[in-house]
Image (tube, rainbow, N blue to C red):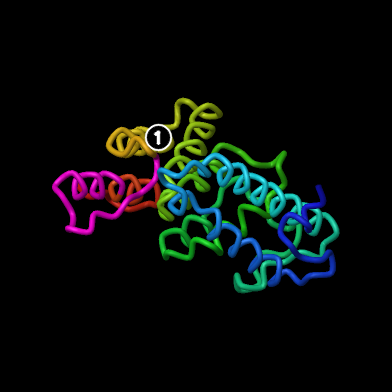
Amino acid sequence: MNPYQVLGVSESATDAEIKNAYRELAKKYHPDNYADSPLADVAEQKMKEVNEAYDTICDMRRSKNTYSNNSYSGTYQGSSYTHTNFPDVRRLIKEGRLDDAMQILNGVASHSRNAEWYFLMGMIFSRKGWTEQAYSYFQTACRMEPSNPEFMSALNNMNARRSYNPSGYNTVNPAGCSMCDICTGLMCADCCCDCLGGRGCC
């Protein structure tokens, strides 16, 4: 299917319109909206299609040198972003600018996506609370670089979160945080601090 049709935009849509369409669909099919719902599998498939469509459009526009990330200070233009590591992305994640970080990563060609690319994608989804997606990205990073302690630490921490919450989705306790909630949050924060250059929580 035409990726533009998947996002519900025309091929003449601006980069901002495409980004907005992607964000709206991502919100619509967010796993939290379908927890314990018979439509969970359908929503997951739709989310996959939306992500693939967005990636495809980014790749196509980058190859034509017409796709640029105007929201990121003009430092990322077309195919000029060829770093094998991603210090800018790490900084954006640390600052909480998750959409900007994701847009840079989505602009990297599929064949250039190394283990760190998958690790950073996992960090973004982890910060967004999308546990299953984060875990999948961390798994790929560890498969590509099994000896990397940073990637393995993130995978282990995410696995602990999944063991605590088997559904894979974040849930909110209306009565407040339990001790388990606090421990899980500290474990995730420790992972985030280590991977982004901090000293950790302990």
The residue under the point 52% across, 29% down is 145
The answer to whether 36 appears left or right of 14 in the picture is left
Residue bearing mark 1: 155
Question: Residue 63, percent across and down?
Answer: 82, 54
Q: For the view shown, which residue lies furthest in the left direction? A: 179
Q: Which residues are magenta?
A: 168-188
118 left or right, relative to 164: right
**x then y, percent, for residue 157:** 33, 37
Q: Is residue 176 magenta?
A: yes
Taking depth in this image into account, of 100 and 80 the one nearest to the observer is: 100
* Residue 14 at x, y percent in the picture: 76, 72
Disc 1 is placed on an element classified as helix
In this view, 22 is above or below 114: below
Q: Quadrant of residue 191?
A: top left
Q: Is residue 126 left or right of residue 2?
A: left
Task: Tell me the kind of residue under disc 1.
Answer: Leu
Residue 147, percent from left and from top = 45, 26
Dot 1 alpha-carbon crowd within 10 angstroms: few under 14, some 14 to 19, many 20 or more: many
